[in-house]
Image (cartoon, rainbow, N blue to C red):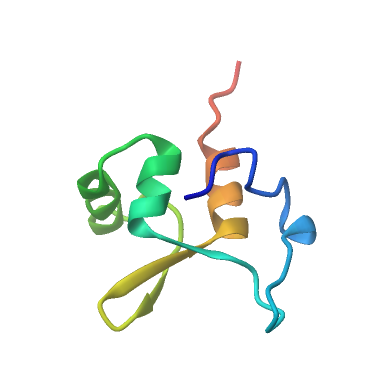
């Protein structure tokens, strides 16, 4: 599981794996990172909220850069 210190600040700094691809989080890892139940992530998806995801069969995967961008969009303005 990744902690928020493990997630890079921008997509330009996302380390690639041996195949040149950025890391992907599964729904359980993302839920733990955000501190929300997995069911909340699925609810957000059905309502068009939440970060973009890739679907591989029945599995959802979230690119670290997409999660970072989505988190930045959630910040409330002062």
Viewer-nearest residue: 78 or 6: 6
Residue 33: which quarter of the image?
Answer: top left
Q: Position of residue 38 (x, y in %)?
A: 26, 48
Left or right: where does residue 6 sit relative to residue 47? right
Q: Residue at x 69, y 49 (%)?
A: 8
Q: Residue at x 45, y 54 (%)?
A: 51
In the image, residue 16 sits, relative to residue 47, either above or below, namely below
In the image, residue 41 sits, relative to residue 66, either above or below, namely above
Q: Residue at x 25, y 41 (%)?
A: 37
Q: Position of residue 71 (x, y in %)?
A: 54, 41
Number of marks drawn: 0
In the image, residue 32 sits, relative to residue 55, either above or below, namely above
Q: Residue at x 60, y 50 (%)?
A: 69
Q: Position of residue 54 (x, y in %)?
A: 43, 73
Left or right: where does residue 45 sit relative to residue 61? left
Q: Position of residue 3 (x, y in %)?
A: 54, 41
Name the quarter where the C terminus is drawn.
top right
Q: Determine the residue located farthest toward the top in the rendered image.
A: 78
Q: Determine the residue located farthest toward the right in the rendered image.
A: 12
């Amino acid at each position: 599981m990744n902690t928020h210190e493990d997630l890079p600040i921008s997509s330009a700094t996302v380390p690639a794996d041996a195949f040149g691809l950025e890391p992907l989080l599964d729904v359980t890892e993302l839920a733990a990172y955000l501190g929300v139940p997995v069911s909340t992530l699925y609810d957000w998806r059905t309502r068009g909220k939440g970060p973009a995801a890739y679907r591989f069969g029945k599995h959802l995967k979230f690119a670290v850069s997409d999660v970072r961008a989505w988190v930045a969009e959630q910040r409330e303005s002062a």
